[in-house]
């Protein structure tokens, strides 16, 4: 795995640099849209847990009002819809709010594929990931858990999928995650504003069977 992580880092840098150049027109359009839609900075940064549980600040396009409570996962807000801006709803649905994380990838704080970085105070998720070694690989822009449920997955199942990614980490696994992410974004699969762990019990049982294979 150590050898692949080194190769993965080189690929991450090259692909994210190309992505930044190609997507620069979209960046410019989104910057203007966010500024025209609501008051506040274009970018939003938040303390997250990186590889080996080291903290770093993740970058996103701001999707919520500046009076939104800090460091609270969206699903724990009393009424998350009241804080999300009009442009923010579109950005979150299409996952375009995640694009600035290209800079986190270039800086070596993240990878394109890997477990999504937990908030610094999501102790339950961090603890669950410790069981599977999922805190010891670079966090990703997208990952195996994201294409298998995204916001709908409860903490325990999400950590298991992250663990399965670590167990099978390699080029083919990353390619599957990348292609799966494109499909999920197009279909807006698993996006549940203000909710996590809302997947039906029947679906959870199916997920457990998938992870155990």
Image (cartoon, helix red, strand yellow):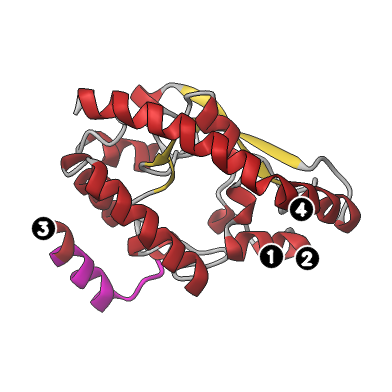
The residue beneath circle 1 is: 89
CA neighbours of label 1 inside 10 A, class few (<14), some (14 to 19), many (20+)? some
- Dot 4 or dot 1: first in sequence order is 4
Above or below, comparing residue 108 to residue 115 in the picture? above
- Dot 4 or dot 2: first in sequence order is 4
CA neighbours of label 2 inside 10 A, class few (<14), some (14 to 19), many (20+)? some
Q: CA distance from mark 4 to mark 1?
A: 13 Å
Q: Are marks 1 and 2 in contact (CB under 8 Å)?
A: yes
The residue beneath circle 3 is: 212
Going by the image, does 106 lie left or right of 118? right
Q: CA distance from mark 4 to mark 3?
A: 41 Å
Q: Are marks 4 and 1 in contact (CB under 8 Å)?
A: no
CA neighbours of label 3 inside 10 A, class few (<14), some (14 to 19), many (20+)? few
Q: Position of residue 120 (x, y in %)?
A: 49, 32
Q: Are marks 3 and 1 in contact (CB under 8 Å)?
A: no
Q: Secondary structure at mark 3?
A: helix
Q: Residue shown at 59%/48% (left/top)? A: 98
Q: Secondary structure at mark 2?
A: helix
Q: Residue shown at 30%/28% (left/top)? A: 7
Tag of residue 86: 2
């Amino acid at each position: 795995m150590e050898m692949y992580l080194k190769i993965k880092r080189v690929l991450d840098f090259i692909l994210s640099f190309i992505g930044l150049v190609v997507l620069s027109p979209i960046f410019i359009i989104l910057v203007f849209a966010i500024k025209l839609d609501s008051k506040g900075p274009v970018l939003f940064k938040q303390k997250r847990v990186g590889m080996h549980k080291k903290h770093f600040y993740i970058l996103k396009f701001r999707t919520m009002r500046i009076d939104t409570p800090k460091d609270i996962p969206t699903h724990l807000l009393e009424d998350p819809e009241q804080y999300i801006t009009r442009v923010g709803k579109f950005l979150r649905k299409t996952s375009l709010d995640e694009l600035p994380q290209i800079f986190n990838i270039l800086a070596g704080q993240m990878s394109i594929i890997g477990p999504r970085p937990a908030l610094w105070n999501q102790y339950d998720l961090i603890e669950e990931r410790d069981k599977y070694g999922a805190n010891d690989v670079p966090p990703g822009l997208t990952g195996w858990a994201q294409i298998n449920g995204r916001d709908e997955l409860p903490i325990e199942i999400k950590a298991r999928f992250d663990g399965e990614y670590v167990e099978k980490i390699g080029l083919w696994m990353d390619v599957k995650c990348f292609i799966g992410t494109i499909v999920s974004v197009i279909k807006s699969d698993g996006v549940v504003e203000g909710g996590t762990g809302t997947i039906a019990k029947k679906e959870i049982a199916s997920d457990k069977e998938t992870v155990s294979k």
